Image (cartoon, helix red, strand yellow):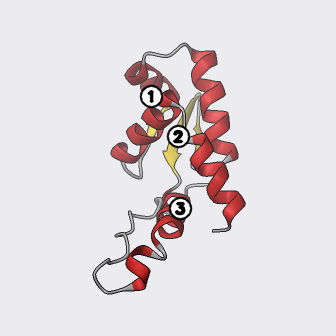
């Protein structure tokens, strides 16, 4: 991950509602949540959630997939793991005292970017 991508991801996560949405999606796991489920959990109006998801999409932190009439949103674990690696790559000056962050599971096979 380069510095610009890290800044984009950190900027996207720097809002309370976007951070909460991303955390819900990470907690949901590779299957993600429908936009409606996420909206209910966050208690946000549809237009507000859509705007927040657009910011997270632009930072490549979430991706979605249409399933009939439903849009399912998933955390993009590879991007999240790249951000964590970027933030911790020089942890403790590279000494063995700090291990690398444990990666999260990849998205399920067949999911689109």
Between 100 and 46, the one nearer to me in the picture: 100
- Look at mark 3 in the image and give the residue it sits on: 83
- Residue 16, image x, y percentages: 48, 29
Residue depicted at 47% across the width and 40% down the height: 22
At label 2, counting other C-alpha atoms closer than 10 Å, the crowd grade (few under 14, some 14-19, many 20 or more) is: many
Instruction: Judge whether 40 appears above or below 2 on screen.
Output: above
Instruction: Judge whether 10 appears above or below 1 on screen.
Output: above
- Look at mark 1 in the image and give the residue it sits on: 38
Residue depicted at 62% across the width and 58% down the height: 6
Q: CA distance from mark 3 to mark 2?
A: 19 Å
Instruction: Judge whether 100 appears above or below 48 on screen.
Output: below
Q: Earlier in the sequence, mark 2 or mark 1?
A: 1
Q: Earlier in the sequence, mark 1 or mark 3?
A: 1
- Look at mark 2 in the image and give the residue it sits on: 73
> Do the residues bearing badges 2 and 1 touch, measured as CB atoms within 8 Å?
yes
Q: Quadrant of residue 92?
A: bottom left
């Amino acid at each position: 991950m380069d510095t610009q991508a890290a800044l984009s991801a950190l900027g996207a996560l720097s809002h309370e509602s976007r951070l909460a949405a991303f955390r819900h999606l990470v907690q949901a796991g590779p299957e993600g949540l429908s936009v409606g489920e996420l909206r209910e959990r966050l208690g946000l109006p549809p237009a507000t959630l859509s705007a927040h998801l657009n910011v997270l999409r632009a930072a490549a932190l979430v991706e979605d997939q249409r399933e009939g009439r439903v849009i399912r949103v998933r955390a993009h674990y590879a991007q999240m793991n790249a951000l964590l690696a970027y933030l911790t790559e020089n942890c403790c000056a590279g000494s063995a005292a700090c291990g690398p962050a444990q990666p999260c599971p990849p998205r399920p096979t067949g999911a689109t970017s």
